[in-house]
Amino acid sequence: MSNSRDQETAPIAAPRNGSASNMFRSFGSLFGAGGGGADTARPITPQSSDGYVEFGMQDPERNGRTLGTFAGVFSPVALSMFSALVFIRVGYIVGNAGLYVTFLQFLIAYAILLFTVASVCAISTNGAVEGGGVYFMISRTLGLEFGGSIGTLFFFANVVGCAMAISGCTEGVMDNFGPGGHFIHEASSHLPDGKWWRFLVSSLINTCMLLVCLVGAALFAKTSVLILGTVTICLFATYISFLAKGATNDTIPVPVENTKMNWTKFLNYTGLSSDTLRENLDSHYGTDYTSNDKNVDFSTTFGVLFAGVTGIMAGANMSGELKSPSKSIPWGTLSAVCFTFVSYIILSFLMSCTTPYQTMQNNYLFLMPVNLWPPFTAIGILTATFSTGLSNLIGSSRILEALSKDQVFGSLLNFVLHGTWKGNPICAVFVSWVLVECILLIGSFNIIAQINSVLFMLSYLATNLACLGIELTGAPNFRPLFKYFTWHTCLVGLLGTLIMMFVINPIYASSCIILCLILVIALHLFSPATQAAQWGSISQALMFHQVRKYLLMLDPRKDHVKFWRPQILLLVSSPRSCCPLVDFVNDLKKSGLYIIGHVKLGDCNAVEDAVENQLWWSFLDHMRVKAFTEVTISRSIREGVQHLIRLSGIGAMKPNTIILGFYDNEAPKDFFQNGTSPYKTDGFNEGDIQNFPIRRDGESKHFEVQEYVQILCDTLRMKKNLCLCRNFQRLDKNFITISKHVKYIDVWPINVFNPTSGDPFDMVSLFMMQLAVIMLAKWKHLRVRIFLCETNEERTVGTFETQAPQMDIFSKLKLEQSLKELRINADIIEIQEWSRDTEFTRHARILRQFTAQADEALLDDGDEIAEDKFNRSLLYMQRVNQVIRDRSDQTALSFIYLAAPPKPTLPDFNDRSASYVELLTELTAELPPTILVHGVSTVTSTTL
């Protein structure tokens, strides 16, 4: 509540807005054209005809959710975790790292995966998982900024994963049908080999995947069981071949691109041999013939290994197709992880027992010639890599579609939504296809694999972070059905992922993290706030958890004046009329508490708090101030203000300074609709504007001047510092910043109602100086001026009155010394009017009757005498106003001593309160923005 041309008090009413349908939202399927839920919630009815109780839910069969645990989760996860690694790169890892280190790397990789799977299972069983998979879970848990940025990087991870799988598939094609290929005889033709020929083959494979995505993506998702069966059969055929095939020296050829082995055409194969196993136990790091003979070490082998087992999210990505995501995702993923782990361990051990490390280092596809029926390996390579690549291509397009539906990047991705045909995001598929083509230009499978590992690890890090954060907040609604996790597993998964990212490649890891942070900042600054409000953000829960903890630790009994700062409650009437004051107080708060309070006249039963609060938060967003709002309902303005002063804040963070507008009859200015106002906005619709009413010229106020003065008395009685602000409609912060004419912040530490008060360094004056210094920190080009007003004090001895000069008390030397002790840099200006002019001194006794220091003996004057005294007091105030105005030509802001108002217990309080306000009106007329200050607490310190 505040009243002046700056602020007017009036009730605010708000219409209802929003609807229950906004509470529910579902998302399209990540895979296939048929998944996803409805865009809006269905009405709540007792029961539909198919027996399903409807509460914003639909029958999974009707919603396109047809996949169970095995087909929907186990198969795609197992296929993705086999990928190109199982037939192409396990030998590369074992041959360089040795069996011991290979087992260690598998343990590290699967430990990270297992902890991440625990986090995925916890999140996915804590509520309904819609289409969007891991992106959906991260974005709805971590919030818009982190969710959108991690979702973007997860999109790129799928793109790179697709390129890696295509590169592996190309390698298999060229080694089978290229020069020296296993299925190519000496005289027969073969595919030409070379960097650009391989890129051409990769592009053809990528284009085939594009066609499948355009016409049969949903069908492919349902054939994963058949593909997995094929790969498993080929893998078991490899196991049997290791056990059955004997030693040979002319079966495994040296690849054409392996130029370092040009002295021989074939590599050795020993079959089951204890000597071979003994040699393969330790590491024998060599060079990578597919990457220009770059040296191989622990990080490169682990990067390739981890890239091959990054498919744990494939089941979560199918969430839009699953009948029961919260049940299928945990069990399907965990069983697939165990199955692939055992398969890799057996394969690594059999390789170590049968194949010398020189052979595994120099032919990454040696499994084909040692197989009893070589086409088994060829079929396994092609089906595993093609299915993995296709899965990643489909996944990346669906993630891009989800990002566009969520408007994470605003209208930037709208073309994706417009390019959707029968639920298939055609444009998203084409964008993914183009990006895959760009990644294929890298060429080397092992380099692509390292990039892929880092991107997927960042996604896993975010998943563990999401689960860790929500677990630490202790949110009551976090009750996952999956119980085999704690914050310890989340933390171990998070740290393991972070460390191994840098082990694989510090440059790639740093680049991805920097890119993620840039996306977080960009989304925080430019993304629509409505999505964040709909999703919720774990950052809000974490901040609440920490703020509550520190608020409990903040003990008001330990407050010390050295660390005092203004904790401000600004009472406003209409936000439209007080924008400059709201903005100014935001600078004045000096990192302290800032609350904007408002009193509505009326009955609590007729007010919608939710709508009201939304409007005030929108006002804060428009003003860009760091403040809170408090709105109270009361039958009178005074009672409402008492509520706000007593109850605003929490714990030790309570307002110590109350700021009000000035009570006058000037029509307030509407800064929302004024064409030249820096606060002009079209962000509030007509209904919102009506909820912030403004008093028009000629309209009466909502309360009388007596109630206003009673509010001032209540404030001081509650031991709060008091500030009255006037003329702030003239404040132009931008002009003050650039103007060379405006130079000063003025402080007038003299009580003009009682100019014989003595020391200018009383509590009120020191409070004024403290506020002036705070503003000086904002307007560094200005200087503070303190006006030293010297007076002659009247003293009564018996029946005689004497005058004694007070020059020694108000000496400039003492003022300078005091300012030095307070570390205040200010100019001192001496004012002689009070000491030269006896008329000024003679009014001290008269003016005292309008303040809290009123003498009972002065209250018995007749009406004519009282009126005469008041008229003379008005003339005196006009002269004081002229003194101040003459020195305010270059003033940006003035602080003036506010005498305490008359006590409500005084006789004839109504007349005296009106006179008090009228005298203040004359005192501050036509001045620059002015703050009348009355401090009641010590705010400065001269000690360490």
Image (cartoon, rainbow, N blue to C red):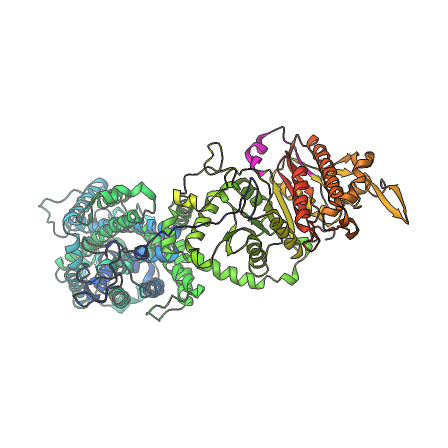
Q: Residue at x 75, y 48 (%)?
A: 762
Residue situated in front as seen by the camera: 55 or 195: 55
Indicate left or right for 417 with 557 as reference. Answer: left
- The image shows residue 240, relative to residue 937, as above or below, that is below
Residue toward you, 257 or 839 = 839
How far from the left and from the top, in percent, is residue 378?
Answer: 15, 56
Q: Give the quarter of the image for residue 812.
A: top right
- Is residue 644 visible in this depiction of the protein? yes
Tell me, yes or no, if residue 790 can be seen here.
Answer: no
Position of residue 740 measured from the top left corner of the image (x, y, whole percent): 62, 28
Q: Position of residue 252 (x, y in %)?
A: 19, 56
Instruction: Please identify the residue farthest to the top as the structure is shown.
Output: 741
Q: Nearer the viewer, residue 377 or 112?
A: 112
Magenta-drawn stretch contains 735 = yes
The residue nearer to you, when weighing 637 against 383, is: 637
Q: Residue furthest bottom?
A: 483
Q: Residue 837: which quarter of the image?
A: top right
Please, which residue is most extreme toward the left here? 187
Asked where in the image residue 773 lies, by quadrant, the reply is top right
Position of 300 relative to 431 (above/below): below
- In the rendered image, residue 364 lying in the magenta stretch gets the answer no
Residue visible at 44% across and 52% down?
A: 612
The x, y position of residue 330, in whole percent, is 29, 67
What is the count of numbered marks?
A: 0
**Residue under the point 31% across and 41% down:** 412
Identify the magenta region.
Answer: 728-746
Q: As drawn, is 439 to the left or to the right of 854?
A: left
